[in-house]
Image (spheres, grey):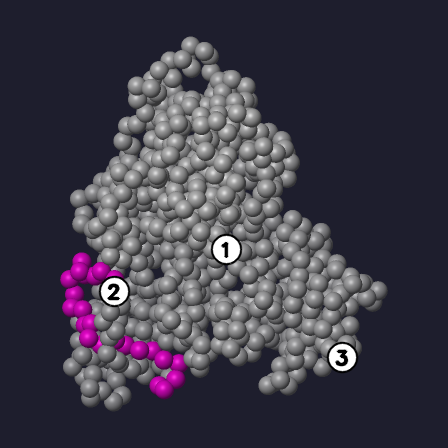
């Protein structure tokens, strides 16, 4: 074993204690090149890299991507290939950076097509997700030497930012394909102060007419007025090292035209080119435009748009020459247009038509966790995911916020740092109207976003509506706005519609209606932070209110717990009389008020309590026995079965549930509320921890990623609903958390038709009626009072809309979005 030149000057005895070094030494002398280590000392995952797999391996494993994992034992770093049979531990976020693993089987793989190249391959491992040995090392991880086999020292250069499978030249982001990722993406350069001969340039208007006869085009002098997100088009068998492309819209005094940056030029220039950048282009080519692609809305420029051809910049054949002009060198006589915007305010939103394209600015008050949805790829193409998050922002023109669905726009440094109290600008947003709800804005391929810290020098700063917004923010008090800010947690918009609609011919609908037996497959195929909405038919057989507990026991780690799970919660609020009411949903009020509320429930006049609880982090733990083991002996009678604790009813089950569950082939115990399901109040002192908590797990570990625990808060509890499939073969538990306060993010845009706070009406509406901030005039019913009305669920055929999200590891969030009666279903 030969040490690399970067080996630290430390006693040789320390190196003999290196687990990774011992593994490599033993592999080098084994005939089979395979090893099951007797020593399973933990090593820490410090980086995870993803790239497109070779086609043969992908087809064999039914997976499109391969993974390299960088490990350290505190002495060496080693980049290893993760055997494709272990890809699922990355998909589910079991294997993640900042945690330890134990290698239980490994091998050494030589590259048979390249001399002097080989690597460690991990074939089996054990994840230790609760430990991180690297945090105890008093060393800079990035300064540790890279471990290589003797004679393969040249491969150290491949250990940095290049895949171990040398057929691929670059890595992809860990969780999507849209973001630039890695060292190959050039950083921001200085503009070039170049003396240009602009006497020989041509104008965009001339390119359309010369398209057929153009041999060697004259240079172009143009300004970028729009920049689109990055597109990765890699696929099996495509012999292109950097299969990227991106669109820009450029303009000169004659009009606008699309410009396409291809392949190797994307890593070199994508992050250097912005709206307002002036370019001098040589050796470009022209081709017919791809007419089916999306385009930015530019009618407000009132300029000629030349859409029949587009400018192509290629790394070769011909090799395009791109010169970035310094802003100080741009001359007014060039006649390049100014960047123009179309900002709209929240007060104007309702009057605009569906699919209207606009720009917005607002003060962020809510930022949802980052989630992913699967993009349906064409057959033969690798699957991919889109990452997105929901945002609320206010602009002072309305009491209602802007509701924003923001997909990744190839700006990961901004997308991952959106937080409450920041000024957000989004361009080229598309308006979506919602029946019975508030309109929302969704991002497009051309959307660009900017937050506090990125506004300086942007062309929009001089826009009148931006200036008006800034003046309004100067009238605000931070402590007042902070009380209305939240971050992370479950959020799904728009909510399920009032009527469930399904097509008679195709069986398609607004939400896919799946067989209960297929639910298990839905759970198993979900990947980390993947969100999916499905609906199932069946009957609600049991309801249990899971009360807040105060113990500090560790969360249950089993995927399908065999015993019920309850909340564990610590209160961060001051324990004074003014906050006692926020945790009182699990206790009985005075006999007088209880009797009054029960009367109001019967008459459909129940009013709301000012529950000023901010729903934040929770943990779950095992309780002593399963719910069904606590049923009374007379549960076999055809009467509704209630369970009491103290003076209040805490559970209900159907009269025939005890008999029915004996014939159920499988019961999916997924009715757990996790800490990632509950939004947190934003606090500046906890900003970094909250951002890490709401973002996707990082692909690279660094000391600043060592997040402090999220401060827990008081939370009363949630309902666990047991749904029996319509064919009575499978049952599933789902959690239900009604909206109780108008300041909750999920209250925005919620259709708030009055109802009587029965169990069914709460499940159908999603909230306790009415949502009120005035605790002195109204009070919500207690869970035991709501459960007393659960008898109307007996034998009722319903359609339940479920929101599914994989939260990592064994945690699959299953939340009820809405419950429909059969009379609320329409076949069209």
In front: mark 2 or mark 3?
Answer: 3
Name the spot of residue 257 as percent of width and height, x first: 23, 71
- Label 2 packing within 10 angstroms: few (<14), some (14-19), many (20+): some
In front: mark 1 or mark 3?
Answer: 1
Residue ID for mark 1: 524
Q: Please tell me whether residue 74 is drawn above or below residue 514 in the rendered image.
A: below
Give the position of the N terminus as an image quadrant: bottom right
Q: Are marks 2 and 3 in contact (CB under 8 Å)?
A: no
Q: Which mark is residue 554?
A: none
Ranked by sequence position, the earlier of labels 2 and 1 is 2
Residue ID for mark 2: 295
Q: What is the spatial separation of the Cα atoms under label 2 and label 3, in whole angstroms?
A: 59 Å
- Residue occupying the point 33% across, 34% down: 765
Residue ID for mark 3: 31
Q: Is residue 174 visible?
A: yes
Q: Which residues are the magenta region?
A: 294-318
Q: Please tell me whether residue 552 is drawn above or below residue 142 in the rendered image.
A: above
Name the spot of residue 334 as percent of width and height, x first: 23, 71
Q: What is the spatial separation of the Cα atoms under label 1 and label 3, in whole angstroms?
A: 38 Å
- Residue occupying the point 68% across, 78% down: 153
Asked whether residue 99 is drawn in magenta, I would say no
């Amino acid at each position: 074993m030969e040490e690399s030149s970067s080996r630290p000057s430390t006693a040789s005895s320390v190196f003999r204690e290196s687990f990774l070094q011992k593994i490599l030494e033993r592999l080098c002398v084994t005939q089979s090149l395979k090893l099951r280590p007797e020593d399973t000392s933990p090593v820490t995952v410090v980086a995870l890299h993803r790239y497109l797999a070779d086609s043969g391996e992908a087809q064999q494993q039914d997976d499109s991507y391969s993974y390299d994992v960088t490990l350290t034992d505190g002495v060496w770093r080693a980049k290893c290939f993760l055997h494709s049979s272990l890809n699922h531990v990355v998909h589910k976020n079991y294997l993640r950076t900042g945690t330890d693993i134990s290698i239980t089987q490994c091998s050494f793989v030589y590259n048979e097509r390249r001399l002097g190249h080989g690597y460690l391959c991990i074939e089996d491992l054990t994840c230790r997700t609760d430990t991180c040995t690297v945090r105890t090392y008093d060393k800079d991880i990035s300064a540790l030497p890279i471990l290589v086999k003797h004679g393969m020292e040249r491969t150290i250069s491949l250990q940095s930012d290049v895949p171990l499978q040398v057929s691929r030249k670059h890595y992809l982001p860990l969780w999507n394909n849209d973001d630039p990722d890695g060292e190959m993406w050039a950083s921001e350069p200085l503009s070039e102060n170049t003396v240009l001969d602009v006497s020989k340039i041509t104008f965009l208007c001339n390119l359309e007419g010369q398209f057929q006869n153009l041999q060697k085009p004259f240079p172009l002098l143009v300004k970028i007025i729009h920049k689109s997100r990055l597109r990765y088009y890699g696929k099996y068998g495509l012999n292109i090292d950097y299969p990227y492309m991106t669109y820009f819209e450029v303009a000169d005094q004659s009009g606008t035209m699309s410009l396409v940056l291809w392949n190797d030029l994307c890593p070199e220039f994508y992050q250097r080119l912005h709206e307002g950048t002036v370019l001098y282009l040589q050796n470009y080519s022209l081709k017919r435009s791809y007419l089916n692609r999306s385009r930015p809305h530019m009618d407000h420029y009132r300029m000629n748009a030349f859409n029949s051809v587009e400018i192509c910049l290629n790394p070769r054949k011909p090799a395009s020459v791109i010169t970035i002009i310094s802003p100080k060198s741009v001359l007014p006589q060039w006649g390049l247009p100014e960047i123009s915007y179309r900002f709209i305010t929240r007060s104007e939103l309702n009057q605009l038509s569906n699919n209207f394209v606009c720009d917005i600015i607002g003060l962020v008050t809510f930022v949802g966790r980052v989630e992913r949805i699967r993009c349906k790829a064409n057959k033969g193409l690798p699957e991919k995911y889109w990452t997105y998050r929901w945002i609320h922002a206010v602009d002072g023109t309305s009491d209602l916020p802007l509701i924003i669905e923001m997909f990744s726009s190839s700006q990961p440094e901004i997308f991952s740092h959106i937080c409450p109290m920041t000024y957000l600008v989004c361009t080229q947003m598309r308006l979506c109207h919602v029946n019975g709800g508030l309109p929302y804005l969704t991002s497009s391929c051309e959307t660009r976003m900017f937050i506090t810290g990125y506004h300086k020098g942007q062309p929009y700063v001089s826009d009148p509506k931006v200036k008006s917004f800034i003046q309004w923010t100067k009238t605000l008090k931070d402590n007042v706005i902070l009380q209305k800010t939240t971050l992370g947690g479950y959020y799904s918009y728009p909510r399920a519609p009032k009527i469930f609609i399904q097509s008679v011919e195709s069986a398609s609908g607004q939400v896919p209606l799946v067989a209960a037996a297929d639910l298990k497959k839905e759970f198993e195929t979900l990947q980390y932070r993947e969100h999916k909405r499905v609906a199932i038919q069946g009957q609600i057989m049991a309801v249990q209110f899971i009360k807040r507990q105060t113990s500090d026991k560790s969360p249950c780690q089993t995927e399908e717990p065999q015993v019920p799970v309850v909340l564990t919660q610590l209160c961060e609020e001051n324990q004074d009389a003014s906050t006692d009411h926020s945790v009182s949903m699990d206790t009985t009020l005075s006999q007088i008020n209880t009797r009054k509320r029960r009367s109001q429930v019967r008459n459909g006049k129940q009013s709301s309590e000012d529950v000023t609880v901010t729903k934040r982090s929770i943990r779950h733990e095992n309780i002593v026995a399963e719910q069904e083991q606590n049923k009374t002996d007379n549960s076999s009678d055809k009467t509704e079965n209630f369970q009491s604790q103290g003076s209040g009813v805490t559970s209900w089950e159907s009269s025939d549930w005890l008999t029915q569950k004996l014939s159920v082939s499988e019961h999916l115990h997924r009715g757990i509320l996790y800490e990632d399901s509950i939004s947190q109040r934003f606090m500046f002192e906890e900003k970094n921890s909250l951002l890490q908590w709401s973002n996707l797990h990082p692909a690279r570990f660094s000391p600043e990623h060592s997040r402090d625990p999220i401060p827990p808060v008081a939370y009363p509890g949630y309902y666990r609903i047991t749904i029996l499939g319509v064919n009575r073969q499978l049952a599933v538990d789902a959690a239900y958390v009604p909206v109780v306060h108008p300041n909750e993010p999920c209250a925005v845009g919620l259709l708030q038709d009055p109802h009587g706070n029965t169990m069914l009406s709460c499940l159908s509406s999603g909230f306790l009626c009415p949502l009120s901030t005035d605790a002195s005039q109204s009070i919500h019913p207690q869970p035991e009072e709501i459960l007393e009305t659960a008898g109307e669920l007996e034998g009722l055929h319903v359609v339940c809309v479920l929101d599914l999200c994989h939260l990592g590891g064994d945690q699959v969030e299953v939340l009820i979005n809405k419950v429909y009666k059969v009379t609320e279903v329409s076949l069209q």
